[in-house]
Amino acid sequence: NAGVTQTPKFQVLKTGQSMTLQCAQDMNHEYMSWYRQDPGMGLRLIHYSVGAGITDQGEVPNGYNVSRSTTEDFPLRLLSAAPSQTSVYFCASSYDREFGYTFGSGTRLTVV
Amino acid sequence: GENVEQHPSTLSVQEGDSAVIKCTYSDSASNYFPWYKQELGKGPQLIIDIRSNVGEKKDQRIAVTLNKTAKHFSLHITETQPEDSAVYFCAASNRNNDMRFGAGTRLTVKP
């Protein structure tokens, strides 16, 4: 039982490049979300999904896209990377918003 | 939307002492309040949670209290140990609103 798996663990991008952060869970959780963590700012919600085929924006969605074609996978796409997107990204899953989240181990992204 | 404030941002205690972290929230509809512990290089991990119909919950050395009238909740760690050193986050949510997190408290337990 792997829980929430994120890949890659580390990534360096050049400004303007695009990439996809992968997230997969094996707990059959309906709810999945992406957060970014910056020093002194806690965890800020980027996008979330309440089930396959359904996604919505969080607090800081600009510059990111998501899709949810299966219950297990919830990839996060950076369309055109900017230095302001340098951060640690966490994927989380849960039964729903009123239950504890299981987090992945994170992806540390640097945009130069 | 929901706004969660957390204090203090850093906390240093001697091993064996107690530690208290406090959070306030703004949305009176919030009814689920979890606490997460994040160790260096890892993702946050749920350590305890409380729902709005409960005023206090304990799990061994950790406890959480909730005051719905004042919209604040607190994490209490007793008999602290060096392995309790980490960053702790509080959060608030309800069925219709996504979980919002406090900015975090870096707890250091000195041996």
Image (cartoon, coloured by chain):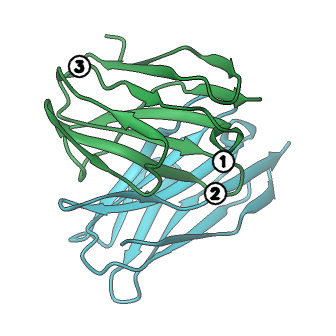
Chain colours: A green, B cyan
- Residue at the disc numbered 2: A41
Residue A69 vs B14, above or below: the answer is above
Mark 3 or mark 1, which has the lower sequence index? 1
Identify the residue at the far bottom of this view: B69
Query: Residue B69, percent across and down?
Result: 34, 89
Q: Do the residues labelled 1 and 2 touch (CB within 8 Å)?
A: yes
Q: Which residue is drawn at 36% across and 72% down?
A: B1
CA gap, disc 1 and disc 2: 5 Å
Q: Could you tell me the amino acid type at mark 1?
A: Asp
CA gap, disc 3 and disc 1: 26 Å
Q: Which residue is drawn at 76% across and 60% down?
A: B10
- Residue at the disc numbered 1: A38
Q: Which corner quadrant holds the N terminus of chain A?
A: top left
Q: Could you tell me the amino acid type at mark 3?
A: Glu
Element under label 3?
loop
Q: Do labels 1 and 2 share a chain?
A: yes
Q: Nearer the viewer, residue A103 or B83?
A: A103
Q: Can residue B19 be seen in this view?
A: yes
The crowd level at tag 2 (other Cα within 10 Å; few <14, some 14-19, many 20+) is few
